[in-house]
Amino acid sequence: MSEIPGQIRYLETLVGIEQDSLRGFFVGWRSPLTPERHLEVLRGSREVVLAWDDELRRVVGFINALSDGHVCAFIPLLEVLPEFRGCGIGSELVRRLLSRLESYYAVDVICDAEVIPFYKRFGLFEGKSMMRRNYT
Ligand SMILES: CC(C)(COP(=O)(O)OP(=O)(O)OC[C@H]1O[C@@H](n2cnc3c(N)ncnc32)[C@H](O)[C@@H]1OP(=O)(O)O)[C@@H](O)C(=O)NCCC(=O)NCCS
């Protein structure tokens, strides 16, 4: 694992975050969200954790959760900018979010097969799910 850049801070609020600091995410998506929509998605989320680079003054990783506020939560998005991967930022985002959701009965994630080992590190286990996607 590479060293975690010292200038990274973890924020659990969107106060002071502007769309300009949310560039570069949704790598590989057919229709990447614009920074404006990304900010709207984060604002609509019950919980967010951001990895903020103090030197670059931008967000380099984020995770969010949607929930009923009591029992169930769903983690729809987690991403670290490619140049910041492999130095523990993704793990720290997951740890911090799971700790905020500690009292919940269910915390669910739907992910690609290659990310399953990553989530297993945090005590999540595999289950069956149903889903619908709108690719247009
Ligand atoms: C998944 C992701 C968030 C991990 O972020 P990261 O900052 O690189 O993660 P960490 O540095 O904390 O990695 C922790 C460990 O998980 C492993 N890991 C990271 N991403 C992985 C992946 N996609 N598949 C399998 N293992 C992975 C790393 O190799 C590392 O292992 P190590 O500790 O033995 O070196 C990042 O790769 C990413 O943004 N991927 C694209 C988006 C994505 O797949 N998000 C998940 C959607 S549900």
Image (cartoon, grey):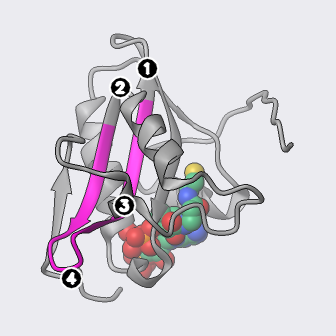
**Is tag 3's residue or tag 4's residue first in the polypeptide sequence?**
4
Q: Which amino acid does label 4 sit on?
A: Pro
Q: With 62 as the anchor, is 96 left or right in this view?
A: left
Rendered image quadrant of residue 131? top right
Q: Main secondary structure of the magenta part?
A: strand
Mark drawn on residue 78: none
Q: Which of marks 4 and 1 is nearer the N terminus?
A: 4
Q: Mark 2 points at which residue?
A: 46
Marks 2,1: beta carbons within 8 A: yes
Q: Is mark 3 on a helix, strand or loop?
A: helix
Query: Between disc 3 and disc 2, whose residue precedes?
Result: 3
**What residue range appears in magenta?**
48-65
Residue 68 image position (x, y, % from top left): 42, 12
Question: CB of residue at label 3: within 8 Å of ligand 1?
Answer: no
Q: What residue type is labelled 1?
A: Ser
In three-dimensional space, the C-alpha distance between marks 4 and 1, rounded to whole angstroms, equals: 31 Å
Circle 2 SS class = loop
Specify the farthest residue to the right.
136
Marks 2, 1: nearer the viewer: 2
Q: Residues within 10 Å of mark 1 (few under 14, many from 20)?
A: some
- Which residue is disc 1 drawn over? 67
Judge the density around disc 4: few (<14), some (14-19), many (≥20) Cα neighbours within 10 Å: few
Numbered badge on residue 20: 3
Residue on which disc 4 sits: 5
Front-most of residues 68 and 134: 134
- The answer for how far apart the CA atoms under marks 3 and 2 are is 22 Å
- The foreground one among 43 and 123 is 43
